[in-house]
Image (spheres, helix red, strand yellow):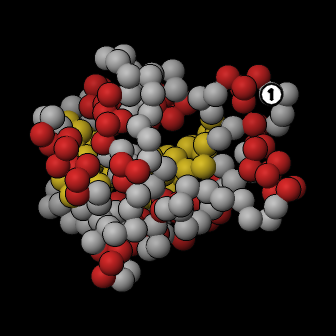
Amino acid sequence: MDTANKGGSHLIGAQVAAMRDDGEAIALDDATIGFFCKYAPGRSVLDVGCVNHNPENYRSKFWVHKALKSVASRCLGMDLYAPGVAYLRERGYDVVEGNAEAFDLGETFDIVVAGEIIEHLGNVSGFLQSAKRHLKPGGTLLLSTPNPWYWRFVAKAFISPDVHPNPEHVSWFCVATLRTLLVRHGYEVLETTLGSRYRRDLLMPLPQGVKHTTIHVAARPVG
């Protein structure tokens, strides 16, 4: 990884508009939050990429870190976006600055969560190895990533082969490639699901593999 990327100069951060739906409520019925929180109650959690671009997202009911913090025994956040980390620390959140591709926090956790992070990384192997070092025996890695076969992406591909993702994304993963990647790095895949928070998707009469925006995976280091 080059020096510029180590400094986070590629991050778009608060240029991304904050999520709407502000309030004290937490969207526990959201597909991604529900998947993560199913594993997290009473457990120690490391939330990688906790800022989610714009730190103002802390106000949203869809902010994953708030949901994890509400059910975990301890929830530490980590993010490369230094201004976002500082902003959240000022508001009382336990977050640290760190690079998902290579980190050493000197402690282990029951759960490592990486919500919509893996597709941002140039060094995915570095992340999976770092996550493994931070898991307690029997601990679980939880991932989410955009579904490349989501019907809107497929529809756009009919119009142009250049389907633009988030400008920070450097790769796409499907269920099969995620499973292969995890097994290759010494993980056992425990569960995979697909989900979407949008009513339009849930009502679409389409196969599961194309109607949902997001892939969720739970995996555990082997041995």
Residue 2 sits in quarter = bottom left
Left or right of 204 in this view: 192: left
Q: Is residue 104 left or right of residue 61?
A: left
Q: How many marks?
A: 1
Q: Is residue 42 above or below residue 156?
A: above
Q: Secondary structure at mark 1?
A: loop
Q: Is residue 132 visible?
A: no
- What residue would you read off at disc 1? 204
Q: Is residue 74 shown above or below 53? A: above
Residue 42: x and y in percent read 27, 29
How dense is the environment of label 1, judged by Cα within 10 Å: few (below 14), some, or many (20 and up)?
few
Q: Position of residue 73 (x, y in %)?
A: 21, 31
Q: Quadrant of residue 27?
A: top left
In the image, is 137 to the left or to the right of 204? Answer: left
Q: Measured along the vertical axis of the image, is residue 129 above or below residue 46? A: below
Circle 1: residue type? Met
User: Which corner quadrant of the image does residue 192 belong to?
Assistant: top right
Q: Nearer the viewer, residue 126 or 19?
A: 19
Residue 39 at x, y percent in the picture: 40, 34
Residue 99 appears in the picture as rendered: yes
Pick the residue in front: 154 or 189: 154
| Residue 176 percent location from the top left of the image | 68, 58
Residue that appears at 52% across and 26% down: 30
- 7 or 108, which is in the foreground? 7
Residue in the foreground of this view, choosing between 133 and 75:
75
* Left or right for 171, reference 218: right
Q: Residue at x 69, y 38 (%)?
A: 212
Name above or below for residue 163 compared with residue 208: below
Q: Quadrant of the N terminus?
A: bottom left
Residue at the image point whose x is 65% and y is 41% from the top: 213
